[in-house]
Amino acid sequence: MIKIGLLGCGNVGRIIAAHAGGIRVVAVFDIIPGRAEDLAELCHARAYTDFDLFMQEDFSIVVEAASVDAVKLYGEAVLRSGRDIAILSVGALADEEFCERLIDVAREAGQKIRIPSGAIIGLDNLKIGQISPPEKFLLRTTKPPASLGIVARERTEIFKGLAHDCIKLYPKNINVAVALGLAAGRDADVELWVDPGIERNIHEIFAEGDFGDIYIRVRNTPSPDNPATSYMAALSILTLLKNLENPLVVGT
């Protein structure tokens, strides 16, 4: 049974705790005491608001489900402690200098930085782009206007350009774009749309190259307890963790 330490005790942490068959949550950390204590009680773990004490617990991997700031604050320390880290707030790796430093630390420590597929599918096969670069690589994301604080009466394109430029304008909506870029080894072109006629986020991925043509469309279901969180993203980290001990690993 894999033992994990959970960094961040929000909605994703609760989903992990609820579906943790084969996974033991040993300790949870959050800067808000009540959240840490509530989740610890749910998964029969120990609660910490002190990161150094949290890291003294017996687990082999830390699952980050907190924030971009948490990744930047604690990521290197986790790797240097001799543990892998699974990062849900992959937007932290949009900072190229930080990303390179974190990879260097992981390499020196002999550990892994693990990125779940999150709110999309097909991330594993898009890694072929590192060998056979795509000629076309586009992410088209469509969101309800209210999710971006925008009023729109019709479907409207609000951004078109490269992922790293979209990140500067919409920093809270970058996880998918960053994950795609890390998988394929190049920045994706991004179109960001708002549509008052939809209630769920829609991600469309287009890739063309020597490998063929790829089109993926995902319409996310919000998490039951937090509409801002994709339920698929939470389930993807569970799948990643279960694969760590599965003798049969499917996918690239």
Image: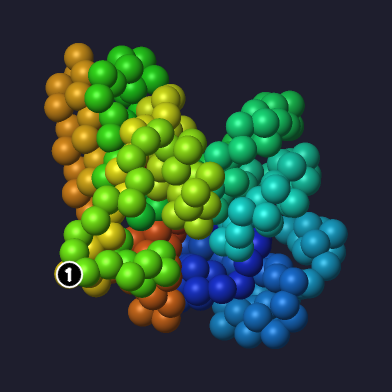
Residue 201 in the image: x percent, y percent? 29, 62
Disc 1 target residue: 197
Of the 4 image quadrants, the one containing the N terminus is bottom right
Q: Is residue 31 left or right of residue 194?
A: right
Q: Is residue 90 above or below residue 26?
A: above
Q: Is residue 174 left or right of residue 46?
A: left
- Residue occupying the point 63% across, 85% down: 38
**Three-letter amino acid code at the position of disc 1:** Gly
Image quadrant in which you'd find residue 97: top right
Q: How many marks?
A: 1
Foreground of the two, 180 or 114? 180
- Residue occupying the point 23% across, 46% down: 204
Q: Is residue 50 left or right of residue 163?
A: right
Residue 177 in the image: x percent, y percent? 41, 42
Residue 82 in the image: x percent, y percent? 74, 41
Image quadrant in which you'd find residue 215: top left
- Residue occupying the point 27% across, 51% down: 157
> Residue 247, can we see it?
no
Q: Is residue 221 above or below residue 114?
A: below
- Residue occupying the point 45% across, 54% down: 173
Of the 4 image quadrants, the one containing the C terminus is top left
> Residue 38, can we see it?
yes
Residue 92 in the image: x percent, y percent? 59, 46
Foreground of the two, 214 or 248? 214
- Mark 1 crowd level (few <14, some 14–19, many ≥20, 10 Å Cα): few
